[in-house]
Image (spheres, rainbow, N blue to C red):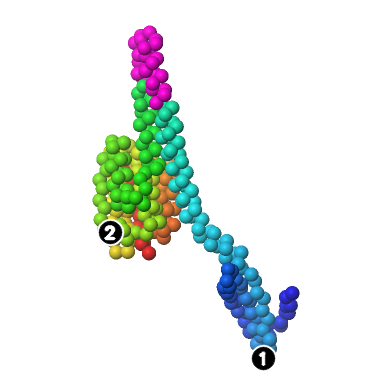
Amino acid sequence: MIEAAILPEEDVSRVKRVLISKSYPGTAVAAHLDLVLPAQKNAPALGIATDINARKAAEQDLQALPDQLLNLVAEERRRIAVELHDSTSQHLAVISLSLMQLRSAVDMTPRVHDLLQDMAVAIDSAAREIRTFSYLLHPPHIELLGLDGSIRDFTKGFARRTGLNVDLDVQGDLSRIPPDLRTGIFRIVQEAFMNVHRHARASTIALSLAIVEDQACLAIADNGRGIPVDESGRHTLGVGIPGMQDRVRHFRGIFEMSSDGNGTRIMATIPLV
């Protein structure tokens, strides 16, 4: 039971809020204690304690939410990549074999020949696209190769699968980057390269990553057509750029982007500590 009294304004000097935190074996208590301190000497103070354990727990859950979301996105990408590789690619392989059998089972008029040839080209293109997207969605494990090795392996595979030229410049001791930030930087690289492959119509991508004092500095530029703008002159962004912005913001970094008819450039500066 809590007893409360209303003091005349002239009898109250101030209200003081105190955060009480107490730990016991197996539990922790957090509360706000509001003290009303009377102006009269030797007069008793009135206090109300408010249990804020639930609020503290909710704040901790909220702080952990971005990491959980990023992990869920990574796991979903892995699942989609496996499905594309193990299921969709196999279906295309079956269609390709059936098409080869069809060539010998029908009268090969010029019209039929052209139709079958167009189908074969489309199937081959779809298979290459699926292999590329599967690789982009689920690249090598950073834990095994490290950030430097993962970026080099990823860009090499990207260039081989897409035909784009990749200029890579990595400087500094990347082992100074905390493990969660390594994954974040790699995901930014992954998303940026996927955007270039899908939208930019570029022939070259330049990637630089350097450790400057206590910051990781990442820059990715392409020579494509740039990001389209709407009637107000704003860039029409999909989900890729905002996703990269969120990742950089999560690590208390600064994200910058510029784009015109000569290509797009993104820059991220992220503190190591």
Q: Amino acid at mark 1?
A: Asn
**Location of residue 213 with respect to 95 vertically, above or below:** below
Q: Picture quarter containing residue 12?
A: bottom right
Name the quarter where the C terminus is drawn: bottom left
**Location of residue 214 with respect to 11 vertically, above or below:** above
Magenta part of the protein: which range?
93-118
Q: Between residues 84 and 23, which one lies in front from this camera angle?
A: 23
Q: Specify the farthest residue to the front.
A: 25
Q: Between residues 43 and 237, which one lies in front from this camera angle?
A: 43
Q: Specify the farthest residue to the bottom.
A: 41
Q: Whole-percent x and y of residue 34?
A: 63, 76
Q: Answer with left or right where residue 146 lies relative to residue 26.
A: left
Tally of numbered discs: 2
Residue at image mark 1: 42
Q: Picture quarter containing residue 90?
A: top left
- Marks 1 and 2 sit apart, C-alpha to C-alpha, by 64 Å
Q: Answer with left or right where residue 271 lies relative to residue 27.
A: left
| Residue 117 sits inside the magenta stretch | yes
| Residue 193 sits inside the magenta stretch | no
Whether residue 63 is visible: yes
Tag 1, which secondary structure? loop
Q: Residue at x 32, y 52 (%)?
A: 146
Residue at image mark 2: 173
Tag 2, which secondary structure? loop
Q: Main secondary structure of the magenta part?
A: helix
Q: Whole-percent x and y of residue 231?
A: 43, 42
Q: Amino acid at mark 2?
A: Asp
Q: Residue at x 45, y 32 (%)?
A: 87
